[in-house]
Amino acid sequence: MMTTGILLAGCDNKPAVNLGGIAGTPNPYNYMKASGQCQVGSLADAGKNTKSTTMQVRSDDGYCAIETRAAAGHPYASFGVSPAPDHGKVFIYNYNDHTYVTYTANTAYSGPDKFRVVLIPGGGKPREYMDVTATVTAAK
């Protein structure tokens, strides 16, 4: 019995990426692979309740993440994507008092992509939008 415990202790699978790995509750999405290239520009005003940003990412089956919060400093109550990207997928979730927007480009794609994130602060406050323009390079 003790030998089994010692052998299993050697199989401690640690995630390759720590999304928001702040002390406290473990991030349930810690297993996700980060892209070898991920650069996100600063959020800029782009109209009423709308921000925009750019992203440079590699199409290597890894994600690139944007971390955001509602004006009150808390995660958004709800969210969605409309329109969705043509050449990848977006996954949005709340963790550790932040909202994370992750984008993963289709494998081997190279070129532009764009999507709009709909962020709902809750409490009767108006929806907010984040327009993301991604430049994707193919993995070498």
Image (cartoon, grey):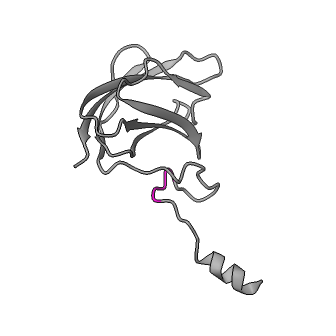
Q: Quadrant of the N terminus?
A: bottom right
- Residue 133 vs 14, above or below: the answer is above
Name the residue at the right extreme: 1
Relative to the observer, which residue lies in front, 93 or 90? 90
Q: Is residue 68 left or right of residue 9?
A: left
Residue 39 in view = yes
In the rendered image, residue 88, in percent from the top left (x then y), is placed at: 38, 31
In the rendered image, residue 92, in percent from the top left (x then y), is placed at: 52, 34
Relative to the observer, which residue lies in front, 109 or 95? 109
Majority secondary structure in the magenta region: loop
Residue 35 colored magenta?
no
Give the image quarter of residue 6. Answer: bottom right
Q: Is residue 116 left or right of residue 60?
A: right
Residue found 36% across the figure and 36% down from its top: 105
- Residue 43 vs 45, above or below: the answer is below
Residue found 56% across the figure and 37% down from its top: 93
Q: Is residue 97 left or right of residue 129?
A: right
Residue found 60% across the figure and 26% down from its top: 78
In the rendered image, residue 85, in percent from the top left (x then y), is placed at: 39, 25
Residue found 46% across the figure and 18% down from its top: 82
Give, as a single range, the part of the protein colored magenta.
Answer: 16-20
